[in-house]
Amino acid sequence: MQERILELFRDHFGVEPDAVLPMAGDGSSRRYRRLRAPGVGTVIGAHGPDAEENRAFLSFSSAFRTAGFPVPDIFVADEARGVWLEEDLGDTTLFGALEEARAAGEGFPESVLPAYERVVDWLPRFQLDGHRVVDYAVACPRGAFDEQSILWDLNYFKYHFCKLAGVPFHEARLEADFGRLCAFLLEADSDHFLYRDFQSRNVMLRDGEPWFLDYQGGRRGALAYDIASLLYDAKADLPETVRGRLLDRYLGRLAERDAVRPEEFLRHFPGFVLVRILQALGAYGYRGFFERKPHFLRSVPFAARNLEAILAGGLPVSLPELERVLSDIARRFAHRRPGPDPDPGRLTVTVVSFSYRRGYPDDVGGHGGGFVFDCRALPNPGREERYRACTGRDPEVAAYLERAEETRPFRERTRGLVEDQVRTYLERGFSSLTVAFGCTGGQHRSVFFAERLAGDLRRAFPEVEVRLHHREEPFWP
């Protein structure tokens, strides 16, 4: 991939880049490099393995640039090879600016509100003016957010979140509710451009002004979906007062264009909020539970709290089975502490418990390697009825294991190995280490040892960031 990008750069600019820097990926399969050369500055080289998605992105980019929208300039593209060079918009996303401002104080930082307002001001232009200039023939995977698209999203939630998180549902009753929700959403006017992923990580801030990315999933659709995506972006965690102010501003911009009847928009808006949150949960489940990328699961408590608020206000139509499922998700996930993202300048040790029934845990740091300790030779509390509903966090399980003569030497040996490794990693400036404990069910022994080691490391190495992840927690009784 990199060689194809370098060749494109040399052919287009006539010089060799003097630096090629990897860039952090997003949730997709696209890959990016930042290239730098004298007289050129910096340029982003991109590779996308999906030819149809690439075609949509490049076509929409050209249309939006022609219309004067703040989207990256595409300098050159080789669609046949799936690579292109685009304008470098910097590293500051709207979400990043929000998180940085939040770190300096409590609550929602008013300093970020003007950026959100400018983003909201641009959205109707994408939806109304963009609708007139894009070629929907290249839209991928469908030309409209129609019944098929909505049902894809709902089933994504059902199979990639509910199934993988162990949330029970009645298939026939849930499908009937999906049909009713879909029919309700399709009542809304859908002759507009639907950006599809209009959220804070897809907005770059350059000199304080918003620039927009990742609209390759765009298609015809209803106005409410995109503003719902922005206002209910899970980890952005906007307060209700801020959501209300931004929604009023958005409706005001639409009213200036005589583009909406507010009462009709507001009648359907909660339904689009709901379907967007369910789509996002499906993505978190697929990336987190299936692909075993735990940082996606950090968004789940935020999304679950949004569901709590929706349930408190009442669903837009009668959806009894879906309401029961959402209540279960809110009960199980809304009040979990999601934990922060890793600090890239600090050694992070991730301690994982897991079940061998579901296979080895994936490397979460992206560096490969790490320790995997097998606890299955130790006495198993899960074989006793009184401990079946307990976990390795519970005092009675801890007491059971601590009475076993095998426990102390196992704990001391594993701790010694890990602590020696941590000292070496600190000396060498490494940034990531993973330590995993596995047992039969991932509920008792592995959890006990993961909890104990995490505590030991925090006491021994206060300069190290220690993360604890119980992979099977969603499946515990």
Image: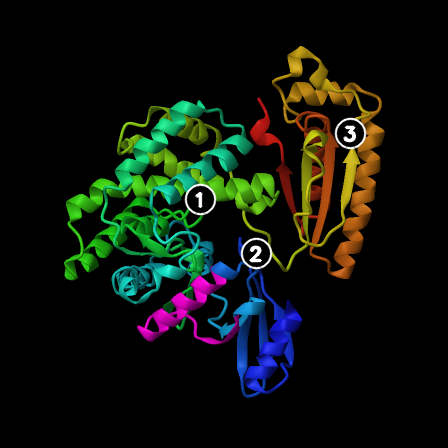
Q: CA distance from mark 2 to mark 1?
A: 17 Å
Classify mark 1: helix, strand or loop.
helix
Q: Find the distance from the CA under tag 1 to the CA under tag 3.
A: 35 Å
Q: Amino acid at mark 2?
A: Ser
The residue to which callout 3 is attached is: 375
SS type, badge 3 = loop
Residue shown at 49% from the left, 70% from the top: 90
> Dividing the image into 4 quarters, which one contains the C terminus?
top right
Horizontal side of 313 relative to 365 (left or right) equals: left
Which span of residues is magenta-colored? Answer: 53-78
Residue 388 image position (x, y, % from top left): 64, 16
Distance (Cα) linking label 3 and label 2: 35 Å
Q: Is residue 84 visible?
A: yes
Q: Position of residue 237 (x, y in %)?
A: 40, 47
Q: Earlier in the sequence, mark 3 or mark 2?
A: 2
Residue of label 1: 280
